[in-house]
Image (cartoon, grey):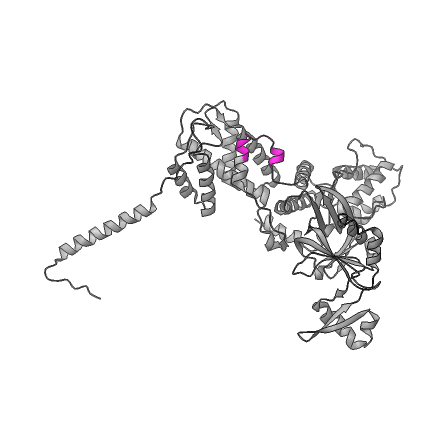
Amino acid sequence: MKLKLRSNFSAARFSSLLLIILTSLFFIQCQRKEVKKIARDITITPKNAVTKLLIDSMELEKYIIGAKLEDSSALRLRNFYNSRNFQFAWLTEKGLAEQTRVFYALDKSYDSTSRDSSENELLLRNQLSGLMTKDTTILSVSPALVKLELELTQHFFNFVTNAYAGKVDPAALQWYIPRKKINAVALLDSLVAKKGAGVAEWEPVNNYYKTLNKELIRWYSIQKRGSWPQLDAAALKPIKEGDSGAVVLQFKQRLIDFGDLDIKDSTAIYTAEVTAAVKKAQLQFGYRQTGKPDRLLLAALNASVESRIQQMLINLERIRWSPLMPDGKLILVNIPEYKLHVFEAKKEVLNMGIVVGKAANKTVIFSNTLKNIVFSPYWNIPPSIVRAEVQPAMRKNRNYLAQKNMEQYGFSDGLPLIRQKPGNTNSLGRVKFLFPNSYNIYLHDTPAKSLFSEDKRAFSHGCIRLAKPKALAEYLLTDRPEWTSEKIDKAMNAKKEVWVTMKTPVPVIIAYFTSWVDKNGLINFREDIYGHDQKMAEQLFPAK
């Protein structure tokens, strides 16, 4: 399409007008990109200022653009410095602030355990390390100092995310417990205000994180010795107390490494203390405590140091995701441990063995709140079980429902609705504990008590069977004095359901930890029964 000009409007005049328009547009674009100064917080004045070292807000914006920070990261940085009237947080006129030294130690410790640093982070740590030994006085603010200040703040925010919230997305790994929320700006405000004091209480992690992290550091020292030799099961089998030899010395060293035997025991004699240490070792792997070094135990002790370190790193990441321990009551189910723990005021008050879902019917990792206890429950059989097991059995045997103490109470989508009536043979036993969820998972009793004698107890369709259901009911109803032990017994042996609503609902977390340090300071390891560790390893330790 050609542009036609009037005869009195020359091409030269058109060109001049076009140039003016383009120049105006360019000026407008430049105006749009110009960064506006951020208004300062007037609550901080020269009288209450911590330092006279200040960052110009324009320099802050230049850093944000140069570092290519995402909007959320940029906003976090602006909020932090605006709230302190753009004062430096890490440097003062006298050099490094106390909180800087504390953060340096925290960061160095995290780096030594996680061993996951970028090139930029290493350069920053080296720069900070150099300043640690210098008696520095800062007379003026230079661009280099501004850059160091802002890099340290951004590095702190990255550190908090990785060290306290975790790097991997839990939901992508079938972990449906709400991720712990971290307010990085509030943490930094607190660190600066306290000048790094009380950092043990300041860190947003629970005690399980601290003890496992400490154990990981110890295992790094074991790793430095190199790969350990494989223990010979055939050579150890005939060994008994009083015997001695090179194989005994090697075995004792392995027990020392796992924390089961006193480090001072350096003789080659198989003593009673070794038998006791073997029982401890069997306990830390979830095996029956026979006191004999069988093939199962030796296989666990022969796993490489590197694999155990990786297992600890995987579980440290899971603990980072996990919410902090509440001050009230908490029920924690640990699937690979086959155990339920009850905590009150952050201390364990009850525990018991459990049966969890088999590999084909994995128990889901999630959290919710226990609101109801149902004594003498019906078992409303899930449609999947009706379709796969009950319906085929009904076709083969017309008396199947009566023989199994079941009844049909309707239809849904062409499938019979089946439930098992209360009684001794009810698959839910005499009591169930309900915390509403879309996975149809709950805690319950079971008539199959013999399964609790097994080391590995993944037998259910997904729900969690309890070894001591009455003990849990009694504990949860302590705030309902009318529910005596005798009344609970009666309700558990009734012919119809008895519902009890909790006066104070209790949070339930169904988790998956294959390594932790127990209350006695013993490192524990469990089998990755659902393959979740393997999937996490692919995320945390990608092949290079």
Residue furthest to the front in view is 482
From the viewer's perspective, is residue 458 above or below residue 346? below
Which region shows up in magenta?
190-205
Q: Is residue 404 left or right of residue 361?
A: right
Is residue 136 placed above or below 530 in the rendered structure? above
Residue 527 seen in this snapshot: no
Q: Is residue 199 magenta?
A: yes
Rendering coords of residue 184 (x, y %)? 53, 41
181 vs 309, left or right, is left
Q: Position of residue 391 (x, y in %)?
A: 75, 73
- Between 459 and 333, which is closer to the camera in this rendering? 333
Labels in figure, total:
0
Q: Which quadrant, please, contains the N terminus?
A: bottom left
On the image, the x and y values in percent for residue 95 come to: 48, 26
Residue 149 x, y percent position in the rendering = 46, 34
Q: Is residue 199 in view from this perspective? A: yes
**Residue 337, placed above or below residue 391:** above
378 sits left or right of 166 in the view = right
Please tell me in which quadrant of the rendered image residue 373 appears.
Answer: bottom right
Looking at the image, residue 104 lies above or below residue 327: above
Residue pictured at 68% horizontal, 55% vertical: 531
Q: Quadrant of residue 489?
A: bottom right
For the residue pair 95 and 280, the one nearer the viewer reads as 95
Q: Is residue 127 left or right of residue 462?
A: left
Name the residue rendered at 69%, 48% in the picture: 513
Q: Is residue 200 magenta?
A: yes
Measuring 70% from the left and 53% from the top, which residue is drawn there?
Answer: 370
